[in-house]
Amino acid sequence: MKHWVLLVANRYFLSPRRGSSHVPTFLSVLGIATGVMTLFTVIGVMNGFQHSTIEAILELNSYHIRLSGYPEDLSILDRIRGIPNIRSVFPFSDMETLIQGSFSDPMVCTLRFLPQDILQLDPSLQRILTMIDGEFDLTDPDGILLGVELARYLGVRVGDTVKLLWHAGDFNTLSPQMKPFLVKGIWKSEYYEHDAGWGFLPFKRAYVPSTNGSPVYTGIKLVNRFGDEPVRRAIELVVPPSIKVTSWREYNRAIFGALRMEKTVMMILIGLIFLVVGGNIYRSQQRHISERIEEIGLLRAMGASPTSIQSVFILEGAFIGFLGAGMGGALGLFLSGRINEVFRVTEKVVNTVFHWANLSLRVSLFSPANFYISEVRAIIPLWEAFLIVLFAIGSTTIAAFLASYKVATIYPVEVLRYE
């Protein structure tokens, strides 16, 4: 690019337009900055919510890879643990049954049977779960650990007894009975479906009634869950053909697909801001070119090509995109990192205004009492931030390109004839 093109573009960007001021340029930069800031903040908060949901599902429920069975040959488990990227391997089993506490009405709950030393086998479980009361103790065969919401619905605390619908006997003489269990601990995972319907029991094959053998599975967690496909193929070479290997992508396809679609639609809707701003820049650049038509004619008379002159206005649009994206990105990162403080300040200001206006309304943007999380987390991956900035700069550059397209039709003789 010729050096004078950059100098002229910089002069046009910084100097007021004829008969006007910096207001059109300022509004264009402000529009891009607002769009980038909004996208950064919204996408960051959505990523935080989705990350919490996905983490709770994968770390507590489905795991990264599961085997439909538990190999009797322990050497197979040793070979699986030796596969790169594998963090932990352990058996588990699930059973749905009825549970009854202090209240008369029983509830449906999911029982997950885990090894007594699960915290040693899977240290990440201790990070996901917060013990509200009691301890994470699976050494008592008649003890149970309940989710905090399930314990609240049942009206029980640590030390109380709950009854589970149990099937005793073999296949021909199954007889249901209410078996008592002592509540040893109450935990919270910040995922409502788990906290409201799950309980942990010590893993024993005899504890899992089934008509065709104990439904025991193998849970596998990875260091990097996105590297699941090579691990899955390696495990299939180790386990018998009768054991099915399922990754987290296949097991949670529906819910993860819905989360991805929600995020995509939100980005598209907010991204329309850039189209609106791009349209405004297009009209503004057209007026700008009309105001500079004598200068364009003079540049053409001095030997500047139409492409070079068009590059001046394209660069001016790119400057608007760069400045707006930089300002909006900085503000978006700042707001995302302090989103909880922003919510609290906004609530206080709005409720103060309502109080001065003698209105009984009260606004609660975020409260743990209304949302089943203790705080909002914002996560902005680098590649998503890059795409947002790239789209913002691209929209202004393309708008300037389209607006400057008619520069090629300007002839210096016609422009300077009346000067």
Image (spheres, rainbow, N blue to C red):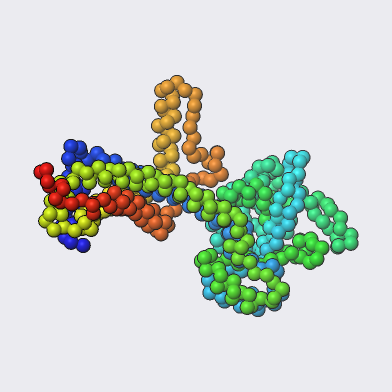
Residue depicted at x 37% and y 54%: 391
- Extreme residue in the top direction: 358
Q: Quadrant of the C terminus?
A: top left
Residue depicted at x 84% and y 53%: 176
- Left-right relation of 376 to 11: right
Q: Position of residue 278 (x, y in %)?
A: 34, 47
Q: Quadrant of the N terminus?
A: bottom left
Location of residue 15 with respect to 60 vertically, above or below:
above
Location of residue 167 (image quadrant):
bottom right
Location of residue 305 (image quadrant):
bottom left
Residue depicted at x 20% and y 55%: 309
Residue depicted at x 44% and y 34%: 347
The residue closer to the viewer here, 388 or 177, is 388
| Residue 55 visible here | yes
- Left-right relation of 70 to 367: right
Q: Position of residue 327 (x, y in %)?
A: 30, 48
| Residue 396 visible here | no
- Left-right relation of 180 to 219: right
Q: Position of residue 42 (x, y in %)?
A: 44, 47
The residue closer to the viewer here, 246 or 157, is 246
Number of marks in the rendered image: 0
Location of residue 415 with respect to 384 vertically, above or below:
above
The residue closer to the viewer here, 138 or 261, is 261
Location of residue 74 with respect to 213 vertically, above or below:
below
